[in-house]
Image: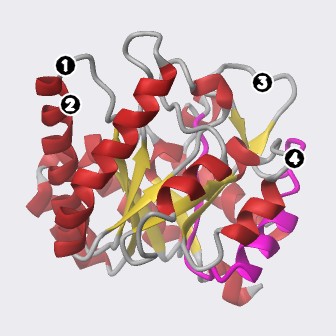
């Protein structure tokens, strides 16, 4: 378990009320060795200050969240989104992580097939730039309930199909238990993803779900077979950081240090 705890990463959205500095300091106090940084937190203080804070604390950055959001109604808007993704790649490289998590984006006009094509086109255009910066694109499939507002890539199978067009050094997949636990093809698709899993995120699916967006639970409070999934991604070759990513207003409203203590307890017991 000691080795597993060395892989623990705080996905910054779990302590949304904390600034980057507060989150970094919290990780240091809690002896959490990794952090996943959200771009809106970088924007608050700037890239160079963000880099300084993380470097001075001695933390490792597991990923940057997020790139993606490729579909848009016009070619001009799609190009603007691609430019934003290029900035995200630069931020990832500057902060010392090789993983940019992609939340691929919803359909802008009730045409889900075209939106999925836009996602594939956006990734194709971004790959050379990302590779030149040493950054892998991690396609994160989102639960189907997010297809209308966050992502039209909703299964690990879809993500694998896109990723397989590229080398594992260019494009991989992110397995988030909250988004994929329900999939009857899950373990088959994890096996298919062998060698190109670039991230593993944990939380839990609580019943009833209190909110579509802010509805994730602490590990052990729900129905997900987290430990089984962790073993499956390891069998598929992933032994990198494990991000605790919990989007939940009740957890956001608690003192951050208290949340980090509970994360460590639940992580050791359920992951």
Tell me where residue 130 appears, x and y as whole percent: 23, 65
Disc 2, SS: helix
Q: Earlier in the sequence, mark 3 or mark 2?
A: 2
In three-dimensional space, the C-alpha distance between marks 4 and 3, rounded to whole angstroms, equals: 20 Å
Which of the two residues, 158 or 252, is positioned nearer the viewer here?
A: 158
Q: In the rendered image, which residue does mark 3 sit on? A: 209
How packed mark 3 is, by other alpha carbons closer than 10 Å (few <14, some 14-19, many 20 or more), is few
Image quadrant in which you'd find residue 167: bottom left
Q: In the rendered image, which residue does mark 4 sit on? A: 184
Disc 3, SS: loop
- Residue at horizontal 69%, vertical 65%? 264
Depicted 50 relative to depicted 34: above or below: above
Image quadrant in which you'd find residue 72: top left
Q: In the rendered image, which residue does mark 2 sit on? A: 78
Q: Which of marks 2 and 4 is nearer the N terminus?
A: 2
Q: Are marks 4 and 1 in contact (CB under 8 Å)?
A: no
Q: Earlier in the sequence, mark 3 or mark 1?
A: 1
How packed mark 2 is, by other alpha carbons closer than 10 Å (few <14, some 14-19, many 20 or more), is some
Residue stretch rendered in magenta on the structure: 220-247
Q: Residue furthest bottom?
A: 3
State yes or no: residue 123 in magenta: no
Q: Which mark is residue 74?
A: 1
- Residue at horizontal 34%, vertical 73%? 98
């Amino acid at each position: 378990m000691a080795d597993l705890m060395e892989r623990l990463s705080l996905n910054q959205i779990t302590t949304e009320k904390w600034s980057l500095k507060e989150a970094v300091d919290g990780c240091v106090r809690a002896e959490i060795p990794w952090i996943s940084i959200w771009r809106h937190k970088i924007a608050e203080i700037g890239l160079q200050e963000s880099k300084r804070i993380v470097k001075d604390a001695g933390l490792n950055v597991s990923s940057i969240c997020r790139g993606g959001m490729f579909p848009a109604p016009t070619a001009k808007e799609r190009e603007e989104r691609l430019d934003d993704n290029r900035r995200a790649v630069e931020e990832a490289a500057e902060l010392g992580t090789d993983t940019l998590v992609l939340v691929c984006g919803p359909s802008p006009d009730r045409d889900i097939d075209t939106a999925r094509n836009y996602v594939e086109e956006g990734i194709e255009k971004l790959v050379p730039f990302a590779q030149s910066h040493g950054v892998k694109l991690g396609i994160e499939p989102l639960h189907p309930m997010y297809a209308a507002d966050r992502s039209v890539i909703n299964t690990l199978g879809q993500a694998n199909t896109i990723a397989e067009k590229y080398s594992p050094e260019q494009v991989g997949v992110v397995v988030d238990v909250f988004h994929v636990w329900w999939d009857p093809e899950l373990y088959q698709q994890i096996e298919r993803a062998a060698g190109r899993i670039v991230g593993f995120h944990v939380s839990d699916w609580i019943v009833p779900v209190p909110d579509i967006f802010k509805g994730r639970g602490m590990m052990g409070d729900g129905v997900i077979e987290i430990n089984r999934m962790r073993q499956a991604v390891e069998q598929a070759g992933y032994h990198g950081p494990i991000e605790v990513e919990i989007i939940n207003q009740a957890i956001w409203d608690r003192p951050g240090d208290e949340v980090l203590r509970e994360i460590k307890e639940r992580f050791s017991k359920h992951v």
